[in-house]
Image: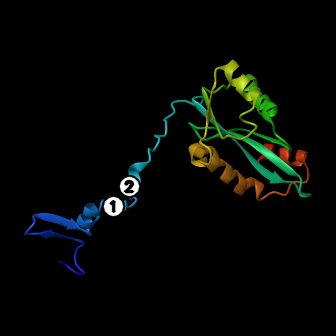
Amino acid sequence: MVFGGSAYFYDVRGGQIIINGFRIYKEEGLNLRNKRPRRSRTASYRYERPTFSNLHDCWSMDLVSDSLFDGKKIRCLTIVYKYSRKCMAIHVGQGINGHQVVEVLEELRLFKNAKPNKIQVDNGPEFISKEIDRWAYEQKVELIFSRPGKPTDNAYIESFNGSFRDECLNTNWFLSLGDAKKKYKTGE
């Protein structure tokens, strides 16, 4: 018998390895306590980030919230190319819904002659609306939704929104919705 050393020993006479009293548990017909296995770092499957070959392979859309000087909420719809990480459009409104998102996408399609193959969005109510679903079906655009609670699935737009908040939203004081639109267009 070994005390204080290793947790197992070899019984020379019986030719058995005894580990933490396993023989006693087995003889009594008891179940061993199963320790929860440690998870390795590679246990979860990691998705590879797709590579993009041109500007219109995939776009990202998200909303950023801010407030006017009097406390009224405003929201900004941001659309970014995933290939170049350039901002295509910023639409400002007080309550942006699916219909307004479709209007912005139609403006881009008609006036800039730009239509993506895929658009990556989160699961917000403005992006899961019937209007966007119908527009995507008619234009043959695939909507890619992020997994719930995983903002890193749409990392490009989240990074852009962080910079947008630091450089524009936190540095400006907006008096009205029109003032906010003017400052976004001029880049002040």
Q: Along the polypeptide, which appears first: circle 2 or circle 1?
A: 1
Question: Which residue is painted at 76% across and 47% down in the image?
Answer: 187
Q: Residue at x 89, y 53 (%)?
A: 72
Can residue 188 be seen at all in this image of the molecule? no
Residue type beneath disc 1: Leu
Residue at the left extreme, as displayed: 13
> In the image shown, does 128 or 4 lie closer to the viewer?
4
**CB contact under 8 Å: marks 2 and 1:** no
Q: Nearer the viewer, residue 69 or 99?
A: 99
* Residue appearing at x 58%, y 38% in the figure: 82
Q: Residue furthest top?
A: 138
Disc 2 target residue: 40
Residue sitting farthest toward the front = 28
| Residue in front for this viewpoint, 96 or 111 | 96
Seen as rendered, the residue at the extreme bottom is 4
Q: Nearer the viewer, residue 169 or 140?
A: 140
Kindly tell me whether residue 149 is visible in this rendering: yes
Task: From the top left corner, tell me how far across and down residue 24 is, in percent.
Answer: 26, 67
Task: Answer above or below: position of 135 versus 83.
Answer: above
Residue 84, compared with residue 163, is above or below; it is above
| Residue that carries the numbered disc 1 in the rendered image | 30
> In the picture, which quadrant includes the N terminus?
bottom left
Residue 39: x and y, percent?
40, 56
State the separation of the CA atoms marked 2 and 1.
30 Å
Give residue 89's quadrant in the image: top right
Task: Report x, y in % for residue 167.
Answer: 71, 55
Question: Does residue 20 appear left or right of residue 171 in this picture?
Answer: left
